[in-house]
């Protein structure tokens, strides 16, 4: 038990650091997307920006959830070190609600991306998907894999969409977008089996971080080319939103 606790502490500590990096990168992606929106005046980039801002907020709640596992007091008794969690009930509530809000903001962010690239405009469909996502979050309280599977299904569509864009346009930018979402998809597939061992969860975090980095590199390239007056159309970088 003692060794397990130390292992969990290290994993959750590293986990929080990686998710902090992912949160920062998501914020930068949101910022660059908004800047590109201001250039092209294409509304989809504004929603793309909002989606990644929501994903960044979800990481904030996830980090808070992780940190509840790292809060402890040290007491010495008979030359042994024990870890005692103070105010356990309060910490349990903080962990529960922060993890719940993580799921809420995370799935809304990916749903918004899904709506953008499926060109979903009908209020009935948006309401239906949003309602089903809420049901998924509630059921995932008892079985977290339901939440991960739902996000996986959304990411499968997005990854396939950007793969088709890459096959059609064959640019380095569309390749980066495809690779970015592919890595994020792989990370969510890994998370489904994260309960087997902590290192499996850690590898999922690495794949997700690499995915966000690929998306960020693409947006930085767009901004740099924009400064050199080389960007004439957003489509050669993302493909058509239509």
Image: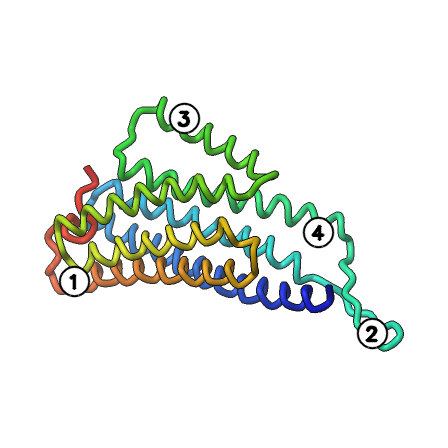
How many marks are shown on the rendered structure?
Answer: 4
The residue singled out by tag 3 in the image is: 127
Query: Which numbered disc, 3 or 2, marks the residue that appears first in the sequence?
Result: 2
SS state under label 3: helix
Distance of label 3 from label 2 (alpha carbons): 56 Å
* Disc on res. 225: 1
Q: Residue at x 45, y 58 (%)?
A: 204
Q: Position of residue 58 (x, y in %)?
A: 49, 49
* Disc on res. 91: 4
Q: Nearer the viewer, mark 3 or mark 1?
A: 3
Location of the C terminus (image quadrant): top left
Mark 3 touches mark 1? (CB < 8 Å): no
Whether residue 41 sits left or right of residue 101 in the image: it is left
Give the farthest residue toward the bottom.
79
The residue singled out by tag 2 in the image is: 80
Distance of label 4 from label 2 (alpha carbons): 25 Å
Query: Dot 4, how many residues are within 10 Å of its Cα: few (below 14), some (14-19), or many (20+)?
Result: some
Q: Nearer the viewer, mark 4 or mark 1?
A: 4
């Amino acid at each position: 038990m003692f060794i397990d606790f130390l292992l969990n502490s290290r994993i959750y500590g590293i986990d929080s650091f990686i998710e902090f990096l992912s949160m920062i990168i998501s914020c930068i992606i949101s910022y660059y997307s908004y800047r590109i929106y201001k250039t092209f005046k294409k509304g989809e980039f504004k929603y793309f920006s909002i989606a990644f801002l929501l994903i960044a907020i979800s990481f904030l709640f996830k980090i808070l959830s992780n940190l509840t596992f790292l809060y402890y007091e040290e007491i010495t008794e008979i030359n042994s070190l024990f870890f005692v969690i103070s105010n356990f009930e309060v910490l349990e509530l903080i962990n529960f609600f922060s993890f719940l809000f993580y799921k809420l903001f995370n799935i809304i962010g990916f749903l918004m991306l899904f709506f953008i690239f499926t060109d979903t405009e009908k209020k009935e469909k948006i309401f239906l998907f949003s309602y089903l996502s809420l049901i998924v979050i509630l059921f995932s309280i008892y079985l977290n894999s339901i939440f991960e599977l739902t996000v996986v299904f959304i990411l499968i569509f997005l990854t396939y969409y950007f793969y088709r864009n890459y096959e059609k346009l064959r640019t380095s930018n569309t390749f980066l977008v495809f690779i970015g979402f592919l890595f994020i998809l792989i990370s969510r597939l890994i998370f489904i089996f994260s309960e087997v061992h902590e290192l499996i969860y850690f590898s999922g975090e690495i794949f997700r971080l690499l995915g966000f980095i690929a998306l960020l590199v693409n947006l930085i390239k767009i901004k740099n080319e924009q400064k050199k007056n080389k960007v004439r159309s957003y489509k050669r970088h993302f493909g058509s939103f239509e």
